[in-house]
Image (cartoon, rainbow, N blue to C red):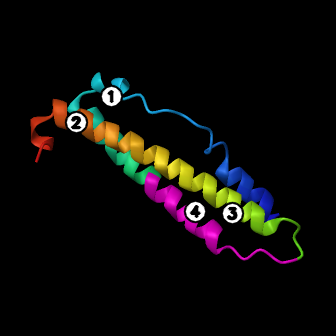
Amino acid sequence: MLIIALFFVAGCSSMARTVNPAKYDGMSCTELNSALGDNARAISQTAVTRGKVANASVPRWVPGGSRVKGAVAARETTRIERLKQQQDAIIAARSRKCPSAAG
């Protein structure tokens, strides 16, 4: 049951998606700040999930339990990396558009 739950938590987060910085160029400073906050929350939530998965105790009798646990943790790591790329794009757009965000 734990393994099934881990798959649902991970979802399709490992699907490769590229970050499109141009989508942030049309946003206002308020929208960029909000997007940055949402992004930071998503990174934190994903890191917590990854930690819970990594620390989950899978019984030895569960076939492939360790592999599944490792795969789910790797997916969460991939998702965090993608979210960090988004965060970098948001920060770059914010520093270009919002004078108070430069410092």
Residue appearing at x 40%, y 40% in the figure: 86
Mark 2 Cα-neighbour bin, 10 Å: few <14, some 14–19, many ≥20: many
On the image, the x and y values in percent for residue 99 come to 10, 36
Mark 4 Cα-neighbour bin, 10 Å: few <14, some 14–19, many ≥20: many
Question: Which of pointers 4 and 1 lies earlier in the amino acid sequence?
Answer: 1
Question: Which of pointers 4 and 2 lies earlier in the amino acid sequence?
Answer: 4
Q: Nearer the viewer, mark 3 or mark 1?
A: 3
Q: CA distance from mark 3 to mark 4?
A: 10 Å
Q: CA distance from mark 4 to mark 2?
A: 29 Å
Question: Which of pointers 3 and 2 lies earlier in the amino acid sequence?
Answer: 3
On the image, the x and y values in percent for residue 44 come to 44, 58
Contact, CB < 8 Å: mark 3 with mark 1? no
On the image, the x and y values in percent for residue 36 come to 33, 44
Amino acid identity at mark 3: Gly
Residue appearing at x 27%, y 41% in the figure: 91
Q: CA distance from mark 3 to mark 2?
A: 36 Å
- Residue matched to label 2: 94
Name the mark on residue 24. 1
Residue appearing at x 48%, y 44% in the figure: 82
Name the mark on residue 50. 4
Q: Quadrant where the N terminus lies?
A: bottom right
Question: Which of pointers 3 and 4 lies earlier in the amino acid sequence?
Answer: 4
Q: CA distance from mark 3 to mark 1?
A: 34 Å
Q: CA distance from mark 1 to mark 2?
A: 8 Å
Mark 1 Cα-neighbour bin, 10 Å: few <14, some 14–19, many ≥20: some
Amino acid identity at mark 4: Arg
